[in-house]
Image (tube, rainbow, N blue to C red):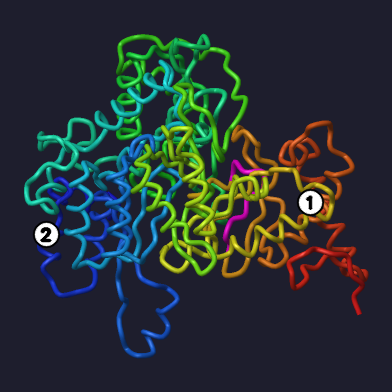
Amino acid sequence: MANVEQLKANSKALRGQIAEELTQPTSGFSAGGAGILKFHGMYQQDNRDARQARKQEAQGKAHSFMIRTRIPGGRVTPQQYLAHDDIATQFGDGTLRLTTRQDFQLHGILKSDLRATLQSIAATLMTTFAACGDVVRNVVCCPYPVADNLEREIWHQVTTLAHHLEPKTQAYSEIWLDGEKAADVGAPEDEPLYGTTYLPRKFKIGVSLPWDNCVDILAQDLGFVAVTNGKRILGYNVYVGGGLGMTHNKPATFPALGQALAWVTSDQVVPIAAAIVAVFRDWGDRENRKHARIKYLVAEKGIEWFREELKARLGYTLVHPHPVTISDAHTHLGWNAQDNGLWSLGVYVESGRIKDTDTQRTRTAFRGIVERIQPGIRLTADQRILFIDILASQRAEIDEILREHGVTPVEQISPIRQRALACPALPTCSLALSEAERFMPALLPQLEQAFASLGLENEAPVVRVTGCPNGCARPYTAEIGIVGRSGDNYVLYLGGSHLGTRLGVAVADLVPSKEIVPTLYSVLTAFRSERLSGEHFGDYCHRIGPERVRQLIDQQTAHEKAGAAVVVSDDSLPTQTALA
């Protein structure tokens, strides 16, 4: 049994030695303790920027913790938002972060403040439990409020799945809440679904409508796409085996899209989800964690094997999927009229980091809106925030709050920027190979100006950056995916779908950060002249194929060597220039 599996088996239902280690005067936990802490919704981290200096001063790592609140469907009340904002001030680094799974993340929490932080979150009927670890994590869905039977049905499925599939151990409430239940964690001490070793790896579930794939449903381990007659949900198509993590130079690891498995009625959603999780529990790879996602089981055993395995567990033959087309993926930004006569406002948050800077005090603005307007709040899988259920008479006041604090209105945000994502990466993520969130402010202006220089400023390719190949910001389904390789070097992926229904292909490796936009320039130039009417950039790259894309990139490189190059000037504008 692998070390992690032994750790889980011996953890006393996720208690480990956490309570004992909390009393020790150290900045962090043991490796085993940190491993169990993930199930409780937190990662032990340190500032990698400071490691060398601390080492030279003969000091150990200065640990802090990233805490992730599990928020099914991204629905947050004003009180819950304000509690997290308070924690960010009192215990954290002064920022709130929105994740691609509709969670909150708090960064920079010290060990001595963990219990107070989790108790503050629990006081608002929220929990960090099972936001991380080898369990079913946060269940995501489209956040847009439509106030009809479709939304009510999907919300029912999300909350039911989240409750049914959460671990039943009382370890969390015992350790952090002094025996009080946190968000109804549940009383049974045994784990009827998870057993003593839980799942081989993490497991992600999403629920979506076919006309709005804003949650990247095919990138989920398990996805449910509603089949409707327009006003009523008839059932769901089930997709299994999606997942975007991989490892460089390990061909046995790869990103994958979910495969169509079955069509189920609404009352079959929870039973089939539980059965699929159980198949993964029993058949997933517990020896090699890099090969331990359900996508590898589906790829190697086949979808028909999976159907037969489920038939044996459920006692009935699955119905084949209905014909459904994923037709759009919305940003939900800007003012939008809700079906109930109220309004929603989607606000862009770069890389999901809600913070105050010298020029834009986003965090203060959001707090002001929440305190004064008391709107409903929903977090999106694109790291944005929706304020919902707003009266028409309140719109002007909200616009003024945002303007006073320098928050850029959506009308002034470029199409490229609106759907761009980045993971946190350096300096706190232990897996990061390269920058991502800190690289995004330099990358986006370069991309915007490159597109504008070619007359393509109205194009809106999906751009995503991650600091490592685990793919937390979903780069492999993007039209332009940029994946950290080593230090300042990245792998460039092109050809993903604007709708999140196709994987991109690696077309250039070890590209320095300053060369990413110049490397793209020849492909953009060809796109401008060769595109079909209405064709998106990712669709164009897919149509011409990766070999042609690589040829365009090679031609650009040869052209540069011959005496001309695309360079990024001081103001980040790509221009043609002669080499001396």
Residue type indicated by callout 2: Ala
| Left or right of residue 143, residue 1 in this image | left
529 w.r.t. 567: above or below: above
> Type of residue at label 1?
Arg
Q: Quadrant of residue 441?
A: bottom right
Q: Classify residue 325 by image quadrant.
A: top right
Prevailing secondary structure of the magenta residues? strand
Q: Residue furthest bottom?
A: 57
Q: Residue at position x 39%, y 40% from top?
A: 377
Residue 550: image tag: 1
Q: From the top left corner, tell me how far across and down residue 232 is, in percent.
A: 45, 11
Q: Position of residue 519 (x, y in %)?
A: 76, 59
Query: Can residue 247 be seen at all in this image of the molecule?
Result: no
Q: Specify the segment rendered in magenta.
A: 476-485
Quarter of the image where the C terminus is located: bottom right
Nearest to the observer: residue 411 or residue 451: 411
